Each structure stands twice: as structure tokens, then as C-alpha cells.
Amino acid sequence: REREREREKRGRERETSFDDRRHFPFLFRDDDKKIVIMLLLASSTARPSSSAPLTRKTTTKKSFCTTAHHHSHRHHRTFFTATKAFPGVVVPKGETRRRYECATRKRRLHASLVAVAEETTTKVAPASGTKYEKENEIALDAVRIASTICDKVQAQLMRMDEKSITKGDKSLVTLADYAAQAVIAWRIGQDEPDMKFLGEEDADALVNGGEDGKEVLRKIAALVNEAIHSFYPDAKQLSDDEVAALIDKGKGEGGPEGRHWILDPVDGTLGFVRGDQYAIALALMDEGELVLGAMGCPNMPKTGDVLEFDDAYSYGFSPRTVSKMLAGGSSAKMDWYKGCVFTAVRGNGCWIWPTSPDIKANPTKVQVSSEFEPQKARFCEPVMKANSSQGFTASVADNLGIESKPLRIYSQVKYGSVARADADVFMKFPKAEYREKVWDHASGVILVEEAGGVVTDAGGTPLDFSKGRYLELDRGIVAASAALHEKLMQAIQLSWDSAAL
């Protein structure tokens, strides 16, 4: 007992408190004359008041200590040994091993942090020289303008200055849905006056809604004009009727012939009104083929920062990251911003940009996960149980050997998560009577495909967006890397057979 007490005393003396700093901001390693920067972020919402000061332990093993993360039922320090990124590092044993494994299960969602300095960037426009170079520029510009509207309206909703509206089909709609559709139709129309357009919204309720409808339309027109003039100061002021006409351009029916754009102006409206993730999803069809996608994710972190909850993960920022973002400065703009736009042109890869054009960062090419390791893998699914069978996705994940909690996200942001390898798999299995709309998936699908992934229905058939406003599906939709897709099909069939017993 005396020897044990002596060892404990020596251990306490070796501990170095860094309660005020709480994090290691960077770890550097010289690898072939490159500096790899690991931005180690906390994944907790707040530090429990009863917790002891965070400490860094001095050990003889070569290991790296991340910040602590907290569960609702316990508090402990977490150690992360980067055996993959840092060859030769010894994996700890015993109690430290338990902590290491806990941290390693979180590693996948922080993979983009490790790769910050290794991403493929370019100063040349990603679609340069392609058939759809001009359309790619238009789509990026349109989504960025719409993002400014959505940011403003979401802030109004959070302050309760505005409210969402319930449509006849019981779905939610906001000023941002209408305004974003109008401004995107306006931007595309500057270069393609005769464009065909398939969008989610129409202006019927505004035009035929009496005085209330006219008042809402006036607010929408004000948002549209403000956003347009912030990007194009010399643009003509649009009247209420002109804005309504722009919204109604989305009444197209799609189909296999000619060119037409597909738009969901605010995908994931429930997440939007809750202050969570949502997407501005735009795609282009040409002769029945999906050829271009641009998806704005104004609340998506630049890197895979997540918060942990009892039954799932969700994108979020640690208090330290929020502090850096609020502090401003060039570092905050380049390293800690939120807001991403994904673009993809068929045959030219998937690229990610900052939502704000004020952030002068070069676009970065992203790819799906290159290999499947069940113990480290993540699967992504909708937040709401009404939108997908979470029990079935859990069964499929179990058959794949995935041990992690799901990453639950509103909207097509899930496709972006798979495209940049924050998650390995996206699965959605809606109710049998539900029909998926083309605008809910078109933009996200081409992003994943151009990032090297595969998107099909649950039977393995690629999605066909040339059938009009609705998709024809076998049970559900799945997205994964090419290496994983075949295993995923087998896991789905096994779960389906088990459910039928």
C-alpha cells in the first residue's frame, strides 16, 4: 500500500495543469518536409462545473493527448494516439488503452482536421475547360447569394422576429424558401433567360393569399432585392410581381429531354427553423443526365467538428472554436469558419468552397473515405424518425460491423458528409407510402458520385432523375464509397430478410 501511495504521489507531481488553456491548439510533425497540422477540438457543449481541472499526463510512451470530452453519465480525460498518421507511435495499455479506444471511435469525424494541410487545393477554377464551366460559376454564385438570405432569415427565426408557415401538405415553409428560390432563378436567368426550372416552391399562396399573402410577398421582395444588391449594386430593383414570377419559374415538370435546373431552396426546413443544418441544393440536368450540382451548407463546419449526445453525433462547435470564430481576424476566417458550398461537374470531381466570397480560400477537392474500417466507420441518417426507419439503419450498420453512434443531420448536408469522408455511409429508408422528390437528392447525389462514391436505391439501382418530380425507388436510398457499396447491399438484404421473419 505504501508503494502504491508513493506511485500515486509521483504521478500527481508529474501532472501539468493547463486548466486555463484546456486544449493543445496544434501538433506539428515534420513529414517529408511537410508540416501536418492537427487542429484538436473539444466535442463537448460545456465543461461540467464539478469536473477536475484538465491535465496533461507525462508518460514515457509517445502519445498525444486531445481535449477532454464529456458524456452525460461520466467525465474522463481522453488520450488519442495517432497510430495511422504517425507511424511508430506505441498504442497505450490498460486504462489508457480504454481511453484511447474511446477517442479513436471519434477520430473519423475529425479526419478532415488531420488533413487540413494535405488537402488538394487549386487556384484554377475547378470546372475550367469543361462543357459546364459557365454553369458551374453561375450555380456557385447563385447559391452564395441565396445563403445570405438564409443566414438573415434564420437569425430572425432564432430571435422570433419571424415565424415559419405550414403549407397544405403540413410541411414547413419560410420567407427564406421563397426568397432563395427567387434569387437563384434571377441569377440563372441573367445568363439563361429561357431556362427551364424545377423547384419546390410556387407563389400561389402569396398571390392568392389576400392581404396576408401580399404582406409576406413584400417581405420576400425586400430580402431578394437586398441580397441581389449586396452582390450586384447596379442591378434593377425588382417589384413584388416580378419576384412572384421568379418563384413561379420553379413550376417546371422536368423530364428526360433538354436542359433544366432542379432546386430545393431550403432543404431541411425543420433543421433551418431550429437553427440547425440545412442546404441550398441546386442541380442541372442535360438530356436526362445529372451533370452538375452546387449545394450550399451555411451552417456546416469547415472541418468535421461534432458534438456528442446520448444516442448520436451532430455537427457542432466547441466553445473554444466559437470563441475563435467570434474573435475574427485572418486566422478565424481561414481556419475556423462555418459555411461550405460543394460543387461538382460530371467527370471533374467534387470541390468545396467557403460560403462567404469574402473568405479568400482556394477551393479544395474532396473524396469519400478510401477504405472501410468497421471500428472507426460512421454512418449518417436523418434526424427525424418519421423520415427514415432508424431501427432498420441500426440493423444494417450492425451487419456491417459499425460500432459507432450515427451522425444525424438534417437535409442533404448528409451527402456532403459522405463526400468529404466525415461519414462512410448515408442511409435513408422512408415509409412505404412516401415518394421521394427529385430536388431532395439531385444535388447531393452528384457530389458523392464525383467524390468517388456510389449512390443507389436499396436494391442497388442508380437513381434516375429524368422521370419528372418524383423518384422511383426500391425501399430506400444509400450512399457510400465504391469499396463499401457491395458490402452495404449485402447488409441491407440480410437486415431485410431478418425483418421479414
Image (cartoon, helix red, strand yellow):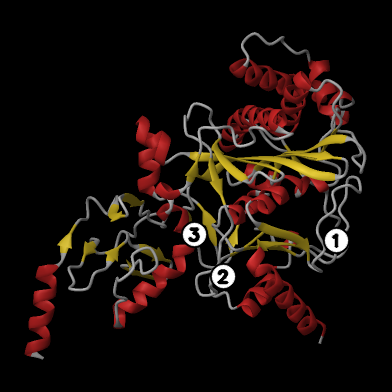
Q: Amino acid at mark 3?
A: Leu
- In the rendered structure, find residue 372 and report the number of the disc placed on it: 2
Q: Is residue 23 visible?
A: no
Mark 3: give few (<14), some (14-19) or many (20+) Cα within 10 Å: many
Label 3 and label 1: CA atoms lie apart by: 30 Å
Residue at position x 53%, y 71% from top?
A: 404
Q: In the rendering, at what x and y percent does residue 17 appear?
A: 17, 59
> To which quarter of the image does residue 94 belong?
bottom left
Q: Is residue 430 visible?
A: yes
Q: In the rendering, at what x and y percent does residue 317 appear?
A: 45, 49
Give the answer, above or below, for where 282 lies relative to 487: above
Q: Give the camera-side residue of 429 and 84.
A: 84
> To which quarter of the image does residue 348 belong?
top right
Q: Amino acid at mark 2?
A: Phe
Label 2 and label 3: CA atoms lie apart by: 14 Å
Label 1 and label 2: CA atoms lie apart by: 26 Å
Residue at position x 85%, y 61% from top?
A: 473
> To which quarter of the image does residue 414 belong?
bottom right
Instruction: Report whether 473 appears left or right of 236.
Output: right
Circle 3/circle 1 CB separation < 8 Å:
no
Q: Amino acid at mark 1?
A: Leu
Residue carrying label 3: 109
Of labels 1 and 2, the one closer to you: 2
Q: Earlier in the sequence, mark 3 or mark 1?
A: 3
Q: Earlier in the sequence, mark 1 or mark 2?
A: 2
Residue carrying label 1: 473
